[in-house]
Image (spheres, rainbow, N blue to C red):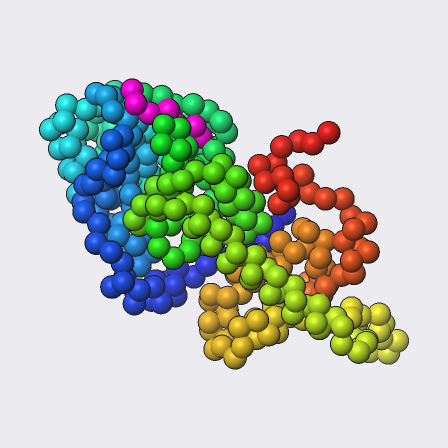
Amino acid sequence: MALHMPFNQSFWAEYLSGQEANLPVLTDIATLSSRVIRILGGNPGAMHLQGTNTYLVGTGPSRILIDTGQGLPIWITRIANYLAQHNISVSHILLTHWHGDHTGGVSDLISHNPSLAGHVYKNTPDSDQESIEDGQIFAVQGATIRAIFTPGHSIDHMCFLLEEENALFTGDNVLGHGFSVAPDLGRYMLSLACMRDLRCGTGYPAHGAVIRDLPAKLEEYIRHKDARVQGVLAVLVKEKEKPDVRVAVGAGAGVDTRGKKGGMTLHEVARAVFGLVPPEVVDQALAPFLLQVLWVLTEDRKVGFEPGDPWTRKWFAVTRRAVESKPRRLYSRDNPCGVQGP
């Protein structure tokens, strides 16, 4: 099981606040295509870019709604007014994942229209919600939406493929600007590969502007994550190739000197990959990400580790023979959606 260590959001918020000025302005309500309307959640900020995007999808009097924003009054006012002005109703509420900036408006919408109770769908649903299964189809006039299970950013993350446009609602897996975070990096990277293999042209992200060239954006995301993983592996391999040094294990007389050749602590890996960065940056921002990278490499049988606290134990590259002698995971880069093989 992957080791999940939380990202320090306040640390990242301080860093990202300086990036907000570079974001393009998005209108509160925008017609993005003949069948997709974007309504902003009214919650702009460092962690949410211009705010959470919610989408009305379809061409007829009944539409599918994707995500509901954070639950701020401005959002329910915007969507209620739009529905009334255009004589539109909502048939299904599809939630990309459980995070509050995507689900917070559900109760307001049901209070506005109680008939929507029982029409809220999410993977691993709450008690008052319906389940979304991988491959499930939701349809209204002008829109056929297929659910795609893409965990990593969250355990329940779903993307939604709009078949009429060959477009993908990417949720928080791929943003309109910058990069997303993933508590489970291994599953996230496999989900990115699965999304790439869908070959959708356009991306409608949960935050940020429309992604007009989704294949290029996905390749950018995959290269970014792969570069980090390969960079960490290269550091550990280089350390392993140094002259053999045996490390004492235990204390007192009769010390066992078995040791692991080329092992590095998390902080040593961070310094080797990122250079001399302040310790608080390592602890608050880099360490959680590097731990996920190390776990991906461990699952791939390319890295091993000594017992103990993950912050202080030694991590080390293993031999190619050890890599090839272990069974491959069901989920792999050659099999990104986890289809059972023969």
Q: How many marks?
A: 0
Q: Is residue 136 above or below residue 74?
A: above
**Residue at image x 73%, y 29%?**
342
Provide the residue span drawn in magenta. Answer: 141-147
Is there any visible trace of residue 319 in the rendered image?
yes
**Residue at image x 37%, y 42%?**
203
**Residue at image x 21%, y 37%?**
31
Q: Is residue 234 magenta?
A: no
**Residue at image x 27%, y 63%?**
22
Q: Is residue 79 above or below residue 307?
A: above
Magenta span: chief secondary structure: strand
337 sits to left or right of 252: left
Q: Is residue 11 above or below residue 198?
A: below
Residue 122 percent coordinates (x, y):
41, 31
Residue 248 percent coordinates (x, y):
80, 75
290 sits to left or right of 302: left
96 sits to left or right of 86: right
Q: Is residue 74 above or below residue 256?
A: above
Residue 305 percent coordinates (x, y):
71, 61
For residue 97, which quarter of the picture?
top left
Is there any visible trace of residue 96 in the rendered image?
no
Residue found farthest to the left: 85
Residue 24 percent coordinates (x, y):
24, 56
43 sits to left or right of 134: left
